[in-house]
Image: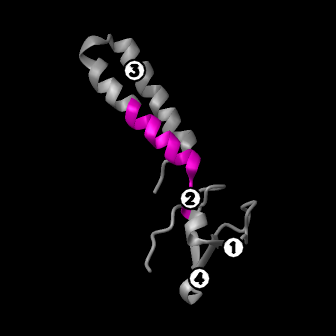
Amino acid sequence: MSKVLKACPFCGSEAVRVPGGEYDRCYCSNAKCPEFPGYMSLTDWNTRPIEDALRKQLEVALAELDYLEPRTDEYVKASIIKTLEEINRIGGMNE
């Protein structure tokens, strides 16, 4: 089963897949990462409940922004966009 691996949840580096037949594993490629060389199953590696919750919150916020956009002044819009960008940065929303 080919599964795309997300970046390391601790440092953002690329994951290294270790073939193991039915039980492939992976670890962070960054030797300075606090989890190096912590081997994990591919499913555990890609499970990010906090990131998933942040993605859902971002979807809701963007939908609200679409609704508010024609009704909101430029200062408030800029503030909302800045907040969403910060959520994106902190949440590690990379794939």
Image quarter of the C terminus: bottom left
Residue 73 relative to residue 28: left or right = left
Residues at badges 2 and 1 in contact (C-beta under 8 Å)? no
Residues at badges 3 and 2 in contact (C-beta under 8 Å)? no
Question: Which label lies toward us, 2 or 1?
Answer: 2
Image quarter of the N terminus: bottom left
Q: Which residue is drawn at 60% across and 65% down?
A: 44
Mark toward the start of the polypeptide (3 vs 4)? 4
Residue 49 relative to residue 77: left or right = right
Up the image or down, 74 lies above or below 29; here it is: above
Labelled disc at residue 78: 3
The residue pinned by badge 4 equals 23
Dot 4 lies on which element?
helix
Q: How far apart are labels 3 and 4 at the CA level?
A: 47 Å
Question: Which label lies toward us, 3 or 1?
Answer: 1
Q: How far apart are labels 1 and 4 at the CA level?
A: 12 Å
The residue pinned by badge 2 equals 47
Q: What residue type is labelled 2?
A: Thr
The residue pinned by badge 1 equals 39
Q: What residue type is labelled 4?
A: Tyr
Q: How far apart are labels 2 and 1 at the CA level?
A: 14 Å
Task: Report whether residue 8 is seen.
Answer: yes
Residues at badges 2 and 4 in contact (C-beta under 8 Å)? no
Q: How far apart are labels 3 and 1 at the CA level?
A: 42 Å
Dot 3 lies on which element?
helix
Question: Which label lies toward us, 3 or 4?
Answer: 4
